[in-house]
Image (cartoon, rainbow, N blue to C red):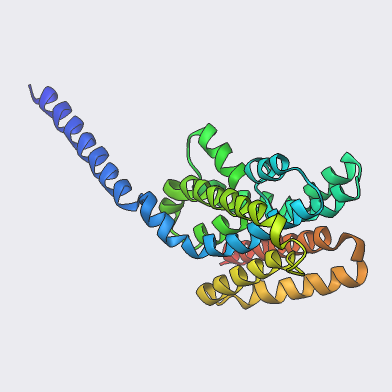
């Protein structure tokens, strides 16, 4: 009887722990409406950036269906903007692929950074990895590990919806304002500047700012034709070296 009672108590204890974990997870799971509210500033920025992409794509003669499909599948503003002049010039597929690959390299580092806190489900984890963006990384990197695990995919899906709607707005307006608003392609750079500034305000990391400036200057001087790739690789190397040095110092203590 004592053994049966002990097993029952152990089972009840496990059930209580599971129930408590579910309650805790429910508290950390951000509702769709709250996520939409929290990401509203990004939607406003996307209206400018995605709208600019839609306008530019239509102005160079890209089909409406292709423009919308690229925002749905590619879902990468920097790649889509870079592809516009290449496709307008009828560049080869290899040129398009190489350019897209180089520009998207940074997402590998995003995935590596967030991988430990991604979903344990393999299919969901893969989908989180392929839909991660600069904006979702900037948002989730400021949250706790558990909040990231529960809300990363939901954030990615909301931002994907925002980007598609913004592109649709640009496509609709493309026939009217395509030639009236110059330098629309700067909208993407402006969005990146805002994201970097907001992260700096939150973390006050002077190392990141200094590293970005040094990487850009060195890449501009020595690798002007491979500016983005050289900058990314230089930053990645410096971050790895810094991490290695920090771990070595911690181990020495």
Q: Is residue 113 left or right of residue 223?
A: left
Residue 250 placement: quadrant: bottom right
Question: 123 above or below 171?
Answer: above
Quarter of the image that includes the N terminus: top left
Query: Which residue appears at 48% of the width and 34% of the height?
Result: 121
Question: 46 above or below 94?
Answer: below
Counting from the top left corner in percent of width and height, residue 26 is at 30, 47
Query: Which residue appears at 54% of the width and 52% of the height?
Result: 162
Of the pair 125 and 76, the residue shown nearer to us = 76
Of the pair 158 and 109, the residue shown nearer to us = 158
Counting from the top left corner in percent of width and height, residue 160 is at 56, 48
Q: Is residue 174 left or right of residue 96?
A: left
Number of marks in picture: 0
Q: Is residue 79 in view?
A: no
Residue lying furthest front: 176
Q: Is residue 186 left or right of residue 219?
A: left
Counting from the top left corner in percent of width and height, residue 228 is at 80, 61
Query: Which residue appears at 87% of the width and 70% of the height?
Result: 220
Q: Is residue 148 in view?
A: yes
Quarter of the image that includes the C terminus: bottom right
Of the pair 76 and 197, the residue shown nearer to us = 76
Counting from the top left corner in percent of width and height, residue 231 is at 79, 64
Query: Which residue appears at 45% of the width and 47% of the height?
Result: 149
């Amino acid at each position: 009887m004592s053994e049966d009672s002990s097993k029952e108590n152990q089972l009840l204890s496990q059930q209580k722990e599971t129930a408590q974990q579910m309650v805790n997870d429910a508290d950390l799971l951000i509702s769709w409406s709250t996520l939409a509210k929290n990401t509203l500033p990004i939607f406003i920025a996307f209206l400018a950036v995605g709208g600019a992409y839609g306008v530019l794509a239509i102005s160079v003669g890209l089909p409406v269906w292709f423009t919308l499909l690229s925002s749905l599948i590619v879902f990468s503003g920097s790649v889509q903007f870079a592809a516009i002049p290449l496709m307008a010039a009828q560049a080869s597929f290899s040129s398009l692929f190489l350019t897209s690959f180089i520009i998207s390299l940074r997402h590998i580092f995003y995935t590596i950074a967030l991988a430990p806190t991604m979903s344990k489900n393999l299919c969901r984890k893969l989908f989180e990895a392929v839909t991660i963006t600069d904006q979702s990384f900037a948002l989730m990197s400021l949250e706790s590990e558990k909040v990231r695990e529960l809300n990363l995919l939901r954030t990615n899906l909301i931002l994907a919806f925002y980007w598609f709607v913004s592109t649709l707005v640009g496509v609709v307006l493309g026939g009217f304002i395509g030639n009236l608003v110059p330098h629309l392609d700067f909208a993407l750079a402006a969005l990146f500047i805002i994201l970097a500034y907001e992260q700096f305000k939150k973390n006050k990391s002077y190392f990141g700012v200094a590293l970005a400036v040094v990487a850009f200057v060195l890449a501009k001087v020595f690798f002007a034709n491979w500016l983005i790739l050289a900058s990314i690789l230089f930053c990645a190397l410096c971050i790895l070296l810094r991490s290695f040095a920090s771990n070595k110092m911690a181990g020495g203590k």
